């Protein structure tokens, strides 16, 4: 298992990387899975918009794109999270949330997608929010 944090076109470094890796392992385990390879890539809004257009044909900004790279190995999840640090910053202000908590929410959101949760229907959105809160509480702020 390898969890990698990187910045693509922004000058941003994740803090407490070791703690975040342990947290992500705990979150996967809570859902009966183990982490395979997980790449968490921070980017700008413009990079995210380009990726959203290229991969999903969506012409709008978003905070995260999740790419599932899980193979046929039962019990493991792998993938790539592309996260706009610009939008995370904006959302933390918009929702009056601490920046580091909003980062955790978005990372958890991506892993939850890899674990099988989605956010298309209203009930799914409510469940996703509930799981995000559980994930944030697992981090022991």
Image (cartoon, rainbow, N blue to C red):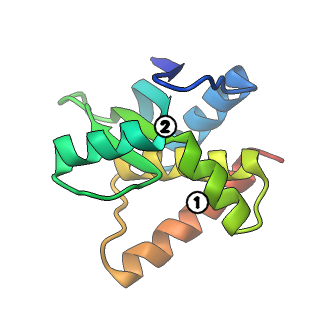
Q: Nearer the viewer, residue 96 or 130?
A: 96
Q: Residue placed farthest to the right in the image?
A: 141
What x and y, as percent, mark residue 74?
Answer: 26, 34
Residue 99 shows in this picture: yes
Check residue 75 in the rendering and tell me which mark sits there, or answer none.
Answer: none
The residue at the point 63 percent across, 56 percent down is 90
Q: In this image, 113 relative to 44: left or right?
A: left
The residue at the point 44 percent across, 29 percent down is 35
The residue at the point 18 percent across, 42 percent down is 55
Mark 1 and mark 2 in contact? Answer it, CB < 8 Å: no
Vertically, is 9 above or below 102? above
> In this figure, what is the number of numbered marks?
2
Question: Would you name the residue on which mark 1 appears?
Answer: 132
Q: Nearer the viewer, residue 96 or 107?
A: 96
Vertically, is 61 above or below 54? below
Q: Residue placed farthest to the front in the image?
A: 46
Question: Would you name the residue on which mark 2 appears?
Answer: 44
Give the SS element for disc 1.
Answer: helix
Quadrant holding the N terminus: top left
The residue at the point 28 percent across, 39 percent down is 51
Mark 1 or mark 2, earlier in chain: 2
């Amino acid at each position: 298992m390898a969890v990698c944090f990187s910045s693509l076109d922004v000058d941003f470094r994740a803090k407490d990387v070791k703690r975040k890796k342990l947290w992500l392992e705990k979150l996967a385990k809570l859902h009966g899975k183990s982490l395979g390879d997980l790449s968490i890539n921070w980017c700008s809004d413009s990079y995210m918009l380009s990726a959203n257009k290229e991969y999903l044909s969506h012409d709008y900004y978003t905070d995260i794109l999740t790419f599932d790279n899980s193979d046929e190995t039962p019990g493991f999840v792998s993938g790539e999270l592309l996260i706009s640090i610009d939008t995370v910053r904006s959302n933390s202000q918009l929702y009056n949330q601490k920046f580091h908590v909003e980062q955790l929410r978005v990372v958890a959101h991506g892993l939850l997608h890899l674990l099988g949760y989605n956010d298309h229907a209203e009930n799914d959105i409510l469940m996703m929010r509930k799981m995000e809160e559980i994930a944030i509480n697992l981090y022991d702020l």
